[in-house]
Amino acid sequence: MKTLRKKAFTLIELLVVIAIIAILAGMLLPALAKAKSKAQGITCMNSNQQLTMAWRFYAEENDGYLVASGRWGTPTLPPEWIGGNWLDKSNLRKSDNWDVDLWIRGISSTGRKVPGRGNLLYPYAGNSTEIFNCPADNSVGINNKGKTVPRLRSRSINNWVGGPGWGGPQCHIFMKDTDMNDPGPSNTFVMLDEREDSINDGYFVVDMSGWPVRSQQIVDFPASYHNMAAGFSFADGHAEIHKWLDKRTRPAINKGNMQLNVPMRDSVDLYWMMEKATRPR
């Protein structure tokens, strides 16, 4: 009788196959990660653009007056676009981080309208709540049921657009949509993605100190979600992803809130934002 022998892989053959799979995975995973980051960047840019369109629709319905990026005790400014919402990474249970109804829709848990709360751009953005958040921002809040949920917002508005201003020479605070003759709507950014540990209010500060020859300090930090880049949208309606060149612009993410108002002399990144923020009067 002939003995039937079963064919099987040897240990060496198995190890060779595993090694080949590992090499292929090592080659493919970085490419997949870049593709995912690029797709998120496109989605982020589109939603940034849509939110800026909502910002423009608001102005059109209010005689050209822009929403304020912040208030800071300035009663002469228009209404603040975020209604007092103040994110806080050191306290994830704070309602500002997670309560969509109160801080985006402006209604209480009982369904009543709450004066001074809610986002003024929400009705002009197709009543979308996702549009305020960059898809690459993975920061979270903890709601009143103890559940971890995505944070409400990762976007802020240029402090010179709607005011108030900050530092440096006397610069233009753009109060109406017709005020942006210099540097012009296509060169004036409105919205941007702000870092999860920098963002607090909806007021992104570009300190103009040192203009026109150099930068002095960075007050708020832009995000670096898209391969060391951030999404920006401009007053003419276009949006873009801008890559950071200065390592000081993108320090490691903090567990809590990061230090703001950091000296950053002669930063090409900060100077780029200064060029796109406003001009001296």
Image (cartoon, rainbow, N blue to C red):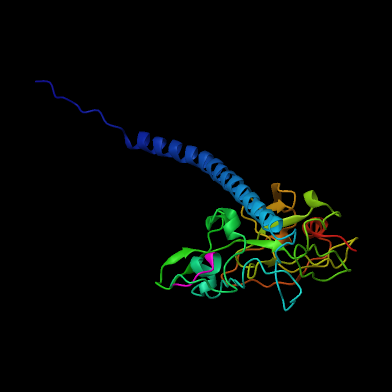
Residue at 44 percent of width and 66 percent of height: 148
Residue 268 visible in the current orientation? yes
Residue 197 x/y as whole percent: 61, 67
Residue at 36 percent of width and 36 percent of height: 12
Establish if 29 lies above or below 161.
above
Establish if 164 lies above or below 73.
above
Q: Is 11 left or right of 140, judged from the image as shown?
A: left
Of 43 and 20, nearer the camera is: 43
**Quick check: is 249 in the magenta stretch?**
no
Quadrant for the C terminus in the image: bottom right
Of 15 and 104, nearer the camera is: 104
Residue 133 visible in the current orientation? no
Residue 39 x/y as whole percent: 57, 44
Of 216 and 131, nearer the camera is: 131
What secondary structure prevails in the magenta region?
A: loop
Establish if 179 lies above or below 205.
above
Q: Quadrant of residue 212?
A: bottom right
Residue at 62 percent of width and 60 percent of height: 121
Q: Is 157 left or right of 183, judged from the image as shown?
A: left
Q: Residue pushed farthest left?
A: 1
Q: Residue pushed farthest top?
A: 1
Counting labels gives 0
Q: Is 182 left or right of 224, judged from the image as shown?
A: right
Residue 81 x/y as whole percent: 65, 66
Quadrant for the N terminus in the image: top left
Q: Residue pushed farthest bottom?
A: 73
What is the span of residues highlighted in magenta in the rendered image? 105-109
Residue 172 x/y as whole percent: 85, 64
